[in-house]
Image (cartoon, helix red, strand yellow):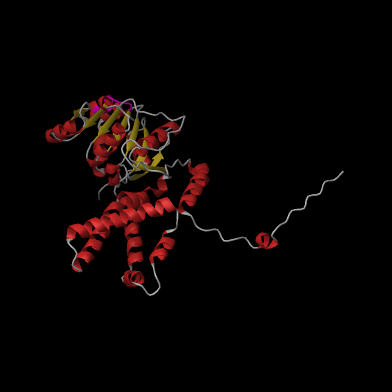
Amino acid sequence: MVSCFVVDVDLVSLSTPKPRRFNLARELQSSVLTNSVKHNIIMSTSAPTAAGEQAAPSATAPLTLDRLAVVGCGVMGKAIVKGLIDNNFVAPAHVTASVASDDSASALGAYFPGSTIVRDNITAIKSADVVLLCIKPFYVRTVLSEPAIVAALQGKLLISICAGITLAQFAALIPNTRVVRAMTNTPARIRQGMTAVCGGAAATKQDVLLTVKMFQNVGRCIELPETQFDTVTALAGSGPAFAFMFIESLADGAVMMGMPRKIALEMAAQMVFGSAKLALDSGEHPALLKDSVTTPGGCTIAGLLSLEDNKFRGSVARCIEATSRRASELGQPKK
């Protein structure tokens, strides 16, 4: 006996596929799934929103650090370590940080009670299996050329947040050290950072995963190929400066129209913060969100046209291009 089923099919829907509406959240997730095959991408799509909140960790990933050394614990080093300690990713007593001056050592010791603060990089490195390198790019070659430091780093995991210093350069300087590059930004201070990571040839998948878990304590984190790191430096690393200038410029305009500066700055900052959160949470393309504010013949389109007249889009895009090109020069020897 042959069973026959009749299904009512809309032939129009088969012949003419409906247009797929752009969704930022969906595209991010799709990109992660697609690129994970090519680049082993791991991404946190939900940044911590308050102290102690973070993305659920992978069952196979280490949940905590045993011992961490921070070489050059300045603004970014402090931000990262604070996030790690506050989220119980590492115990304060298991952190050793090196700084350049006695005043910095005293201030950092008060900021991280229970941690060890030293002025000797070698002592810090020897105290831990994972080393976070937070020094200025132009100091990297000098610091890592010291034979004692090269020896101390042997067999350890070095995580570098130094802009422009490539994995190949690290491999030449410290050939027996596993290296992961990371580029983060100053909003990590309030656990709203954006970080990209990339593992060197000697780094294991577990090394990269541990690094991702570390930076998820201070915001979002994604793994990308190193070829994109100069752009990451421009967009995520330098980007906050551009955003702050935009906020300041918005406030200047409001001041020109008679608004007190303190109120103008608060309003501009909250507007940018809320707009960014809306773009991330709603998943809508920024162009659609822009259009939802733009009434035909209204004041918003007048302002948008003024920006277009002054080459706003091109200026911002070229800003990222110029910054990326400069980032590629940071790790090169001075001529």
Identity of the residue drawn at 39% across and 63% down: 290
Image location (x, y in percent) of residue 80:
29, 37
Q: Tell me residue 180's x, y (percent).
A: 37, 37
Q: Residue at x 40, y 54 (%)?
A: 279
> In this view of the protein, which residue sits in the foreground, 292 or 212?
292
Q: How many marks?
A: 0
Query: Foreground residue, 166 or 39?
Result: 39
Q: Is residue 332 found left or right of 283 in the rendered image? A: left
Q: Nearer the viewer, residue 74 or 152?
A: 74
Q: Position of residue 144 (x, y in %)?
A: 27, 35
View extreme (right): residue: 1
Q: Quarter holding the N terminus?
A: top right
Question: Which x, y percent locates residue 240?
Answer: 29, 52
Of 64 and 330, the residue lying toward us: 64
Residue 145 visible in the picture: no
Q: Residue shown at 28%/34% (left/top)? A: 81
Q: Is residue 36 above or below residue 302?
A: above
Q: Can residue 273 be spotted in the picture? A: yes
Instruction: Tell me the magenta residue range.
Output: 124-129
Q: Is residue 309 magenta?
A: no
